[in-house]
Amino acid sequence: MSGGRPFDLAVRGGRAVLPDGEAVVDIGVRDGLIAAIGRDLGPASRDLDARDRLVLPGGVDTHCHMDQPPWDGMATADDLASGTLSALCGGTTTVVPFAMQLRGASLAAAAADYHAKAAAKAHIDYNFHLILGDPTPEALDRDLPRLVAEGCTSIKIYMTYEGLKLDDGELLRVLDAARALGVLAMVHAENDACVRWLTEKLVGAGLTAMRHHAVSRPALGDREAAFRAIALSEIVEVPILVAHVSAAGVVEEIRRAQARGVPILAETCPQYLYLSSADLDRPGLEGAKCVCTPPPRTAVDQAAVLEGLRDGTLSIFSSDHSPWLFIDKLRHGGGFHTVPNGLPGIETRLALLFSDAVRGGHLSLADFVERTSTAPARIFGLAPRKGLLAVGSDADIVLWDPERAVTITNALLHHANDHTPYEGRAVRGWPVTTIAAGEVLWHEGRVTSRPGRGRFVPAGLPVRPADRPQSWLR
């Protein structure tokens, strides 16, 4: 110990997943950072007994929607206070939500608004993706370079949704700006014309039940859009990340591109493993709880997505937490085409994957940490500060009880939503202690956090294609 000063906190005797493998160790924390990792560390002001616990780096969720501006008169159920509280109780210690610029609005003003909200509300550390809904010269040439210099080094672009979608010419201009600045573009890849045409045909025929949501947004349309986004990125010679992959065909397109050396990254989310199109057909309007975009798909797609997550084709497992109150879904729920798209999942993301994929033998514990923490931190420029247990990294540490049996209910969760689509689902393995920057914020059912304690963490630039090592995608 430096100067013989005791650690502020010591996590003792847990089985930790470290960058070079698993080991039973103590972790000493000082001034919010991991100061030492080893056996029989010296005294600390506070000890946590981690025997019979897994000790993992805090989760990093790089796809979540909180505190977004009202959409058609509605706002997301979670603001940055309740959303980040829910995250930390689920074992996540860093989030990257979206600062959304709508058509006709200022990108700089959107980012400033989110900074102000997060500074007052966030329980845990954060960065922002910049949604470019209106790529004007002012946004691309003035606002974006300044925001990148301030540490927001990722953007998101949409190929669908009124008020957000970009045509191919706009996509090329934005990707060119991303290349010039060295930032990473996330792409929501759906064929907008296909969605609009099918929705019009279905509604015209009176086919508005929730199950038709999946019909209106077919997997083939996602595959075409993903292929087009990849092709445009190849033309511009810039990496992209294909967001929320739901379909086997999209996994195949990404794998084909990666096989020929194209720097394509991708993520998937819990709803594409643990919900299916059959859930849209739940009795009454219960299927509205499972309406998200892209929609949940078939068992064949679920298997392909899981294999893509297993073999690394899909680098990141994020939540796409986008919670809408069920009462709002019902109020606007005359049919699938009027129900707000999105569902909650930030608190259940890690437990679902741990229970099903780790305990089920599909992912190793190291793979679980890689997909949910290390890879998102690395890809979005937050490592080594975030995403791993290493001396000098932030002391973001989660203790898991790998045998804890939990039945998910909405009453158990800490979001501000009135439902979870995973109501009644049994899982085994649960995060029981969350430590962020050396502070114990969640321990055995008790929250000791406070809004506004989270900090903005500036992100570094992702690796450029010309400079990337061959292992960059993995």
Image (tube, rainbow, N blue to C red):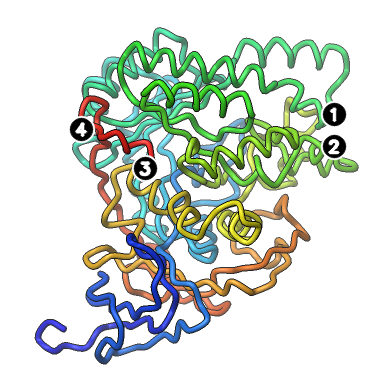
Q: Nearer the viewer, residue 114 or 175?
A: 175
Query: Residue 33: image x %, image y %?
Result: 25, 69
Location of residue 343 by image quarter: top right
Could you tell which of marks 2 and 4 lies nearer the N-terminus? 4
Location of residue 42 by image quarter: bottom left
Question: Which residue was labeled with disc 4?
Answer: 146
Question: Which residue was labeled with disc 3?
Answer: 128
Q: Amino acid at mark 4?
A: Arg
Residue drawn at (59%, 15%) of the image = 191
Question: Which residue was labeled with disc 1?
Answer: 209
Q: Is residue 338 above or below residue 434?
A: above
Q: Is residue 24 above or below residue 212?
A: below
Question: Which residue was labeled with disc 2?
Answer: 281
Q: Is residue 323 above or below residue 244?
A: below
Query: Residue 115: image x %, image y %?
Result: 33, 47
- Marks 4/1: CA distance? 46 Å
- Marks 2/4: CA distance? 47 Å
Left or right position of 221 against 50: right
